[in-house]
Image (cartoon, rainbow, N blue to C red):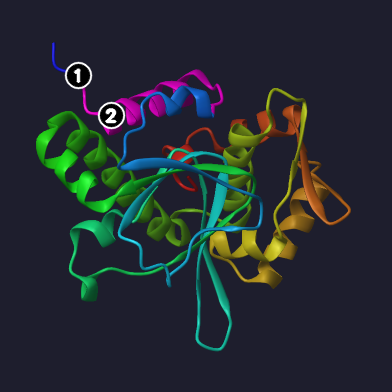
């Protein structure tokens, strides 16, 4: 029986571990590597990729989280998203003409395990493995859905609803079975992520504090399981909130 494509096996393994809620470890992946793929460890606050990287590779973040950002010529940063593994980076660069794809810097928010894939091997695998192509299509469709939801936010939700939805998603991804969760992100980033001004963000924060839906400790938002349940009760009718900030 012909062996499944190695990259496809890794993608399916990462998907399985994500579904189980378990951590993907290097030893799970190392036995599936070939001479076109290698694992790289990226420490917190190091870059996974930058716009100046010229290597012809696709990157698959297997564990950890990272900030996707762009930097202007005068040094201003635009944080576009906080992403959690598993995530592909560089697909557009692999399949599109250079003038059509966009650049971003990707900064590790925590220690990340990254699979570096030779660009030619990635393209060949896509062409030869329909199942891999289907998995990549699902990845791209999910991104389009999320982009659509982001455009809807300003029309459909109040500032309070947007912040509650953001906190519910953050809780889902980070509480780790604990009864309390601290949001370890700058308030300016959260404000930008949910699409409101920093002044509007602090007004919203004060309102939710007065309603006992969150607390602030040393500048960080803290939510408990009971507070998340109350937010969920208030936001339960909103469509598919879990996709909005993934």
Residue at the (11%, 41%) spot, across then down: 127
In the rendered image, residue 88 lying in the magenta stretch gets the answer no
Q: Position of residue 95 (x, y in %)?
A: 19, 57
Q: How many marks?
A: 2
Residue for badge 2: 6
Residue for badge 1: 3
Task: Count residues near mark 2 (Cα–Cα under 10 Å), then give few for <14, some for 14-19, many for 20+.
Answer: some
Q: Nearer the viewer, residue 75 or 144?
A: 75
In the rendered image, residue 23 lying in the magenta stretch gets the answer yes
| Stretch of the chain drawn in magenta | 4-25
Q: Is residue 10 above or below residue 94?
A: above
Q: Are marks 1 and 2 in contact (CB under 8 Å)?
A: yes
Q: Position of residue 155 (x, y in %)?
A: 43, 60
Q: Farthest residue toward the right?
A: 218
Residue 39 badge? none
Residue 238 seen by the camera: no
In this image, 107 relative to 116: left or right? right
In this image, 121 relative to 45: left or right? left
**Secondary element at tag 2:** helix
Task: Count residues near mark 1 (Cα–Cα under 10 Å), then give few for <14, some for 14-19, many for 20+.
Answer: few
Q: Main secondary structure of the magenta part?
A: helix
Q: Is residue 200 above or below residue 113?
A: below
């Amino acid at each position: 029986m012909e062996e499944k494509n190695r990259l496809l096996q890794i993608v399916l393994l990462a998907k399985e571990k994500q579904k189980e809620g378990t951590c993907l470890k290097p030893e799970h992946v190392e036995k599936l590597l070939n001479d076109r793929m290698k694992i790289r460890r990226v420490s917190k606050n190091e870059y996974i990729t930058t716009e100046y990287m010229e290597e012809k590779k696709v990157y698959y973040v297997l564990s950890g989280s990272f900030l996707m950002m762009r930097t202007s010529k005068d040094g201003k940063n635009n944080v576009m998203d906080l992403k959690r593994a598993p995530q592909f980076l560089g697909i557009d660069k692999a399949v599109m003409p250079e003038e059509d794809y966009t650049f971003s810097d990707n900064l590790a928010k925590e220690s990340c395990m990254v699979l570096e894939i030779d660009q030619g091997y990635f393209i060949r695998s896509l062409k030869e493995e329909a199942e891999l192509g289907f998995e990549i299509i699902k990845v791209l469709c999910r991104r389009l859905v999320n982009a659509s939801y982001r455009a809807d936010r300003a029309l459909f939700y109040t500032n309070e609803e947007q912040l509650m939805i953001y906190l519910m998603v953050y809780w889902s991804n980070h509480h780790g079975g604990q009864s309390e969760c601290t949001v370890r992100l700058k308030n300016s980033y959260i404000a930008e992520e949910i699409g409101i001004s920093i002044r509007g963000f602090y007004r919203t924060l004060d309102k939710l504090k007065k309603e006992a839906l969150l607390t602030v400790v040393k500048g960080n938002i803290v939510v408990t399981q009971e507070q998340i349940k109350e937010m969920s009760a208030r936001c339960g009718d909103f469509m598919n909130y879990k996709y909005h900030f993934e």
